[in-house]
Image: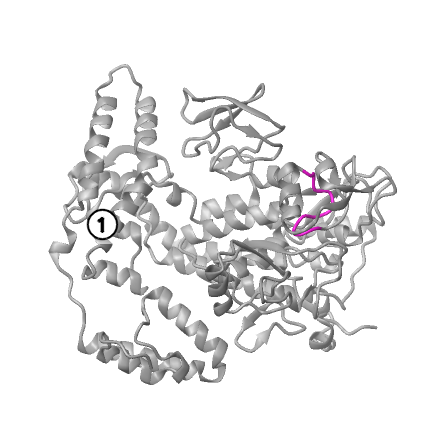
């Protein structure tokens, strides 16, 4: 054990429990530190993991019982950051209230525009100031993972600024005071609407989360491990991810990184190595990048999901991931920690927002448009009804309130570029960026929405769910494709897996292929992706300089299907019965003479033959018995 003058009795008690190679006096046992330490135990000493966790828990319980922790009023004094920042905001709001020329709606809009951008900034500033006191009990509780988050500390020492009514509409009564100071009567009544609404939401949380979990499970239920490695492709494939993201632990490298070879299971030590070597991005195998005829995936794409190593043949990671997300959504909602505070982060979370991401409705106020063409930003101005207009070339794009532009006048943009900080509408995202890039972007926004909703899930649990949700294409060939006719909706992965470069396609340098369509998978990009300068640059960054391309779009178009239709268009008519709108789906199957195969990656057809259900699952990854 390292010697250190700061060794404490607690350090000695913890080190007595840990395996000798992990003993140190420098462990920081906050929430992240404990997680990192236990990951090391799981990787190096899986047989000792349970015993270590149990004994550490005993130490924690003993310390809490014998030592306890005191809170004090002095730690709730208003933060200096709050006093400094709200002084200028109050003057701005008072000027708006004093303007008799404004209507009530104008006043609400202007107050929202003045305060909404400041809410997250103020919360960060108050938290940073509070953290400077290492003895502040509220920060200690939060960083230990026991209770609370940054916004809670800001609510106690800062100001929430804005709140909403039961319908989620911003109330134009600023909340200048913290809970530590106490609300005025007006602030109290304004905040009470959201409090009551959240009480109702909490009661309905279990049902809402269960319904969402069912839809996610239906969408991803075919993601069963069926083989050891992905099917070989001519060009490098894999998902580019942030090398420092600790959610990469357990994934499999798709490309060499320094001394670490492709096919290596990523460990916490490797993530530290990437950071030390200043590596920004790595390529991993992922369920989102493996094209498959039947929905099955490889062990490399599944990665490690238990302490025993790679996922095994027959493991259904799609259903497991959906259940894990549903459980976290339920826990986050039942926590009752959503006070109705209006910030961008709060607006982009919660059951209703998650449902909009899953169902892509026309009315999607948090959505931000993507550029329809290459061009230059000519003008940006405030819309009279609230929100912002951005003009690119001769076209105007409208951004709703709470959605801000990420471009400025004079900027050059490409087809498909994001021009705001809003989440791209999933339908527009898939249409313009192609299925592969759409999955990558959607993954980031969906994962962020889960975190904002209090559902702290691993990104690697979100990947299989996104792979199942974004997996549909519409046949555009007048002569049909295979057994499908024009207008049919079919699984995208099956279509892309069977896709071959067309006769008129040519292998070209990417620099000369801008505006053409990719004819083969490369990195996470799928066939049919339109090549832009950004696409070409990313491919070249991984050593891909040439690819098969075509001047025209392929004879199928990737589309977004709402989550309730997750299995509505599944090729197997029995599988369709495991979803919603079953009468309509069954009628369509009858009309088309659809068939059912009990020996598939879907467990639903095999349930009709219980004698064969799961017989060969661990050998083939399929639920029935081959006839």
Q: Which residues are magenta?
A: 522-531
Spot occupied by residue 517 in the image (x, y as percentages of width and height)? 74, 39
Q: What secondary structure is marked by label 1?
A: helix
Q: Main secondary structure of the magenta part?
A: loop
Query: Within 10 Å of the Cα at label 1, are there few (<14), some (14-19), or many (20+) other Cα atoms?
Result: few
Q: Is residue 556 left or right of residue 258?
A: right
Spot occupied by residue 4 in the image (x, y as percentages of width and height)? 26, 76
Magenta-colored stretch includes residue 371: no
Give whichever of 409, 179 is nearer the camera. Answer: 409
Which residue is drawn at the image coordinates 67% and 48% (left, top)? 525
Asked whether residue 326 is in view, the answer is no
Give whichever of 483, 89 is nearer the camera. Answer: 89
Which residue is drawn at the image coordinates 62% and 46% (left, top)? 538
Q: Is residue 52 left or right of residue 551?
A: left
Looking at the picture, does residue 46 appear above or below residue 222?
below
Q: Can you identify the residue that label 1 sits on?
A: 129
Q: Is residue 579 left or right of residue 377?
A: right
Give whichever of 565, 587 is nearer the camera. Answer: 565
Which residue is drawn at the image coordinates 28% and 42% (left, top)? 122
Query: Splitting the image into 4 quarters, where does residue 535 fall?
Result: top right
Spot occupied by residue 355 in the image (x, y as percentages of width and height)? 51, 47
* Quarter of the image that includes the N terminus: bottom left
Spot occupied by residue 567 in the image (x, y as percentages of width and height)? 67, 54
Query: Splitting the image into 4 quarters, where does residue 202 fall?
Result: bottom left
Asked whether residue 617 is in view, the answer is yes
Query: Splitting the image into 4 quarters, where does residue 61 fall?
Result: bottom left
């Amino acid at each position: 054990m390292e010697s250190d003058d700061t060794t404490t009795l607690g350090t000695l008690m913890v080190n007595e429990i840990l395996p000798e190679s992990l003993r140190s006096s420098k462990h920081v046992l906050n929430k992240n530190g404990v997680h990192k330490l236990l990951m090391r135990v799981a990787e190096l000493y899986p047989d000792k993991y349970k015993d270590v966790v149990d004994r550490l828990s005993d130490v924690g319980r003993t310390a809490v019982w014998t030592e306890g922790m005191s809170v004090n009023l002095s730690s709730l004094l208003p933060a200096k950051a709050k006093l400094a920042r709200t002084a200028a905001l109050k003057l701005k709001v008072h000027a708006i209230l004093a303007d008799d020329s404004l209507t009530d709606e104008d006043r609400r809009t202007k107050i929202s525009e003045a305060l909404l951008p400041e809410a997250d900034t103020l919360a960060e500033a108050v938290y940073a100031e509070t953290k400077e006191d290492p003895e502040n009990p509220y920060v200690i509780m939060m960083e230990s993972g026991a209770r609370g988050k940054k916004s809670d500390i800001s609510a106690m020492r800062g100001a929430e600024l804005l709140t909403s009514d039961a319908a989620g509409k911003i109330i134009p009564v600023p909340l200048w005071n913290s809970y530590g100071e106490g609300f005025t009567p007006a602030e109290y009544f304004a905040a009470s609407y959201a409090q009551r609404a959240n009480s109702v939401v909490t009661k309905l949380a279990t049902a809402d989360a269960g319904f969402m979990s069912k839809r996610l499970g239906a969408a991803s239920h075919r993601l069963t491990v069926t083989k050891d490695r992905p099917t070989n492709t001519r060009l490098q494939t894999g998902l580019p991810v942030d090398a420092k993201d600790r959610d990469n632990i357990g994934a499999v490298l798709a490309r060499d990184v320094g001394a670490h070879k492709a096919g290596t299971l990523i460990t916490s030590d490797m993530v530290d190595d990437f950071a030390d070597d200043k590596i920004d991005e790595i390529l991993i195998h992922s369920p989102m990048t493996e094209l498959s005829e039947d929905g099955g995936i490889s062990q490399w794409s599944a990665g490690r999901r238990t302490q025993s190593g790679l996922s095994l043949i027959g493991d259904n990671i799609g259903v497991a991931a959906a259940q894990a997300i549903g459980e976290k959504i339920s826990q986050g909602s039942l926590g009752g920690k959503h006070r109705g505070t209006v910030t961008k982060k709060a607006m982009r979370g919660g059951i209703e927002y998650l449902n909009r991401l899953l169902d892509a409705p026309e009315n999607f106020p948090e959505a931000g448009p993507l550029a329809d063409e290459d061009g230059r930003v000519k003008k940006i101005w405030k819309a009279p009804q609230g929100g912002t207009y951005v003009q690119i070339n001769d076209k105007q794009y409208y951004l709703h309130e709470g959605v801000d532009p990420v471009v400025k006048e004079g900027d050059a943009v490409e087809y498909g570029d994001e021009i705001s900080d809003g989440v791209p509408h999933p339908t527009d995202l898939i249409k313009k960026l192609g299925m592969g890039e759409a999955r990558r972007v959607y993954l980031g926004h969906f994962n962020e929405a889960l975190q904002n909703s209090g559902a702290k899930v691993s990104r690697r649990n979100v990947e299989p769910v996104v792979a199942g949700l974004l997996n549909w294409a519409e046949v555009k060939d007048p002569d049909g494709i295979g057994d499908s006719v024009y207008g049919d909706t079919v699984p995208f992965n099956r279509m892309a897996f069977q896709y071959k470069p067309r006769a008129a396609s040519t292998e070209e340098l990417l620099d000369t292929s801008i505006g053409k369509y990719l004819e083969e998978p490369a990195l996470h990009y799928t066939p049919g992706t339109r090549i832009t300068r950004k696409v070409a640059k990313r491919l070249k960054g991984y050593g891909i300089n040439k690819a098969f391309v075509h001047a025209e779009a392929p004879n199928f178009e990737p589309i977004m299907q709402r989550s309730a239709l997750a299995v509505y268009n599944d090729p197997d008519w029995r599988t369709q019965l495991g979803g919603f709108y079953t009468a309509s789906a069954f009628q369509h199957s009858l009309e088309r003479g659809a068939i059912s195969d009990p020996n598939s990656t879907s467990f639903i057809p095999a349930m009709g033959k219980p004698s064969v259900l799961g017989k060969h699952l661990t050998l083939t990854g399929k639920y029935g018995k081959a006839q």
